[in-house]
Amino acid sequence: MAAAPLRALLGKAGQTRTLVSTIADALAAPVAIEDADGRALFGDPLASAAARVPVVVGETHLGWVAGGDRAAAVAALVAHLAGRESERHALGAEVLHLYREINLIYSFSEKLAALLDLERVAALTLQQARQMIVATDGVLMLVAEDGETLARVAGFGDEPELGGFRRGRGIIGAVAASGNGEIVNDVADDRRRAVDTTGIRAVVCAPLTVGERIIGIIALGSTVPMAYTAAQLKLLTTLGLQAATAIENARLFERAMESARERERLLALNQQTELARAKLQSELTVASRIQADLFPSELPQAAGYDLAARNRAARYCGGDYYDALVTADGGAELLLCVADVAGKGLPAALVMSNMQATLRALAGGGLPLPELAQRASDLLFAATAPEKYVTAALLRIATADGSLRFVGAGHLDNVIVRADGSIVPLASTGLPLGLMEGGGPYTETTQTLAAGDLVVLYSDGVTDAQNGDSEEFGECRLYELLARHAGASPDVVADAVLAAVDLFVAGAPQFDDITILVLRRR
């Protein structure tokens, strides 16, 4: 205790002065008390000339007591009272310091509660730590998603010199790996120090934990000699616990905001998709209606013959096509066609419309069937993309005698079903239409259709139809069915084929267009 506190202890209104005066009177021995510099603080000036006894508290010399034989007793009393006063002041200072820490921590908690931004939480934590613990440098790092890297979020000073940046490496890395706070007051002698640690002399480091999980570290350091204490580590750990919870809340909030933004983006995208889908469906519906109008609205009538046709697209628009045209006066000749465009959907439908226009433009010219096929192939090649082509079954029949001519342009075999149920294949005789420039030449097959016979033209959507086990309907099943329906009307035959295909696939999705055209001579 210095002279000023001793002087305050012996103040005129102080209890210590009164007590010393009472004891001096009781001892009937005048005493004088001086500070360490010899200035009189109490008593008879005449007593100052007597023997002097020092007043010592711990190792601190506070002053003197003079007054003969009784001076030592008075000196011991003053030293005791001064020590008690010193303890009281020290305890008061400690309580005040603890109150200040508690108040700062409480204020820190209130501020954290209002923050949901990760970087602001980290900056506030370091700012608060710097107010309570002396430091020239500081850093707050979080464990990255890889679980090893420590990523800096906030800092001040020359914080890279504070240690390692990976779990288990350097002083900071060791704390991040173990979860135990550390004090290193001589960084230069610590074997874990970072290679570039040249300026930091002392470090106090605490983990950021949420439950049992270590999410990062907070570290303070000093470039001047510093003796960090366990109390300061405990304080930094307390701040770290509060900060870790706030950081986790900020992360959860950010994830919630990202999820909300993503939901909004997906909702907007879904709305755009729905609008586009509705627009596309509307356009496809129109396209489907337009394509349906390309098929004959009514099949032509020819004396002694019955016709029926069915078409079922795999999608809104299909690439299959059928037609039946009267090419001579009075229905003396019929031109029948079933065609299959390579591909599906709208692109195939566009080529199909081109095929329809081409066939109808050529049909009235009286061309022989092979030449008609050749001309159609050349026109389609010139008007369509190189990868687009058409397989076609073309049949011309003289209605008077039932003589027919058939050209198969890359198409699968079609058939004649005799009245007795026997099957006569009509084989393909050339390349698909539009496959290559100058494709051909085409040759024709001739047959005669007798009374009760059927001609069945169809696309590969019939025979290639598959069930759930990827088994195809095939020609054998088709031929057996046609044989059983020999002599039936074209409508019955066409419907029976579709029904048999549906029963076979048992609900499996239709992956190709189905077309069938049936002509029967009565």
Image: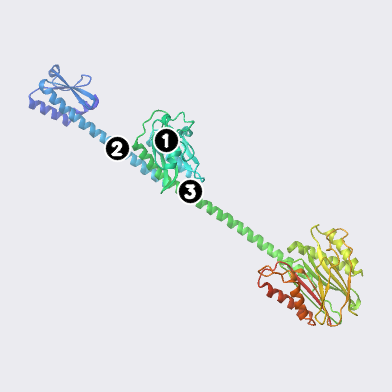
- Does residue 26 lie above or below 427 as drawn? above
Q: CA distance from mark 2 to mark 3?
A: 36 Å
Q: Quadrant of residue 44?
A: top left
Secondary element at tag 3: helix
Residue 251: give its label: 3
| Mark 2 vs mark 3: in front | 3
* Closer to us: 14 or 279: 279
Q: Which of label 2 and label 1 is nearer to you?
A: 1
Distance from the alpha carbon under mark 2 to that under mark 1: 24 Å
- Residue 70's place in the image compared with 462, above or below, is above
- Say whether residue 59 is visible: yes
For the C terminus, give its image quadrant.
bottom right
Amino acid at circle 3: Arg
Dot 2 or dot 1: first in sequence order is 2
Which of 145 and 45 lies nearest the eye of the viewer?
A: 145
Amino acid type of the residue tagged 2 in the rendering? Leu
Look at label 1 and name its amino acid.
Leu
- Name which of mark 3 and mark 1 comes first in the sequence: 1
Read off the residue under disc 1: 220
Residue 345 location in percent, x, y?
73, 64
Q: Residues within 10 Å of mark 1 (few under 14, many from 20)?
A: many
Residue at image location 33% in from the left, 42% down from the top: 102
Residue occupied by mark 2: 96
Estimate how packed mark 2 is, as few (under 14), some (14 to 19) or many (20 or more) residues with alpha carbons within 10 Å.
few
Q: Is residue 111 visible?
A: no
Q: Position of residue 208 (x, y in %)?
A: 42, 43
Q: Quadrant of the N terminus?
A: top left
Vertical position of residue 58 compared to residue 255: above or below: above
Quadrant hosting residue 477: bottom right
In the image shown, does 369 or 26 lie closer to the viewer?
369
Instruction: Look at the numbered disc 2 and give the secondary structure of its residue.
Output: helix
User: Residue 476 location, x and y as percent?
Assistant: 75, 74
